[in-house]
Amino acid sequence: MAIKYIDEADFEGKRVLARFDFNVPLKDGKILDTSRIDLALPTIKYILENGAKKLTLMSHLGRPKSKEDTQFSLEPVAEYLADKLDVNLVLAPAAVDAGVKELLTLNETKIVLLENLRFHPEEKENQMEFASKLAQYGDVYVNDAFGVVHRAHASVHEINRFFSGKNYAGFLIEKEIQALDKILISPTKPFVAIVGGAKVSDKIKTIEKLLVNVDKLMIGGAMAYPFLKAKSRSIGKSLCSDEDVTLAQRILKADRSNKITLPVDHIVASSLDSKAQENLSPDIPEDMMGLDIGPNTVSQYVNIINESETVLWNGPMGLFEKEQFSNGTFEIAKALANSNAFTLVGGGDSVSAVNKSGCADQISHVSTGGGASLEYIEKGELPGIQVLKFGV
Ligand code: 3PG
Ligand code: MG
């Protein structure tokens, strides 16, 4: 069965219940990056413009332990949405509360944002009773929360049980799936991937899956050191666990056509706060740690990107939050922006690097889902998408 998208839905006079991923980075109550909310706006506007009588918005935010964790309130999101949509929007004090249904009967209330779903442990438990309470707020259900469709949680999974034939995906999910399918289903060759980040164990399954399809797989960031160690290089004090070295050995063994490309040089320092130095050899001295890819690695990786037709990037090339270790990550971002290839960036850190470098609009697709995009690449399906197709 195919996913039904919202352009097939009839919203006229209906109460619409819609799940988004408004899990945005916050600092002191301020939203640091509004992209996830901005990218939800077309779906919200479409629902309103197509006659919905009431609209109830749902989301999680962060990983609160209980509802006492008030720093995870969706209040900043409510304020931002009200401003962007220029409407009167009510933040319901709790996601499941007798007051919500009452609120929805009031003439003056058109849009309600439910407070953080994860204030209720039942959300993550994918509990049917919790889902059934949420389901009472809508006649029709819309899911546009791409960032969380890899989680079988009540508001994205079990809830579909109550909307058989009346559950739709929004425009953001449509865009994300189209972009990812371009990479998964017959990508234009050469197809290369750049994978970085901290741990091999986090991404091993994705790497193994990618190795089958890509022409080259460039590795950077802390993830490179277990690979170098597995190849008997010295890595000094660089971040590296024995478990990751074992995993790297397994991957290298599987890589019969030598698709994996490792850094040939590094930016090193004696500690995270020490002065950065170029280390123009693949080997790192004992008293140093690698914190970014070196200049020769950058030009090698950029050359490979320039010769490719499809490029996937996930994970930074170094500790880019610190300026002295950010060059590799930003040079990769620039190379993707300047490339004519189909370029896709996923994963919170690489997305924020692309945003910081100011070239996000030159990337073919910047995914709002780090975990979700990786899991889709690995498995070719996601629980929250599967239920939209086949039901619970
Ligand atoms: C994310 O930012 O990764 C998504 O919103 C999902 O959140 P989670 O990783 O806490 O489940
Ligand atoms: Mg996550």
Image (cartoon, grey):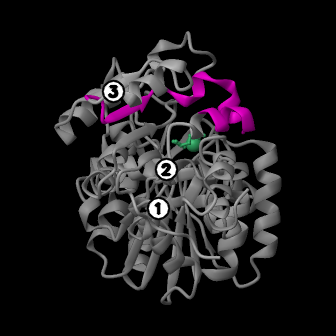
Q: Which residue is mark 2?
A: 145
- Under mark 3, the amino acid is Leu
Residue corresponding to mark 1: 173
Place of residue 48 in the rendered image (x, y in percent of width and height, measured from the top left): 28, 50
Pick whichever of labels 2 and 3 is earlier in the sequence: 3
Q: Residues within 10 Å of mark 1 (few under 14, many from 20)?
A: many
Which numbered disc covers residue 223? none
Label 2 to label 3: alpha-carbon separation = 27 Å
| Sequence-first tag of 3 and 1 | 3
Q: Determine the CA span between mark 2 and mark 1.
A: 7 Å
Q: Name the element at disc 1.
A: helix
> Splitting the image into 4 quarters, where does residue 254 fall?
bottom right
Kindly identify the residue that appears in the image at 62 percent across and 15 percent down: 66
Is ligand 1 closer than 8 angstroms to the Cβ of mark 3? no
The part of the chain drawn in magenta is 108-133
Q: Disc 3 versus disc 1: distance between alpha carbons?
A: 31 Å
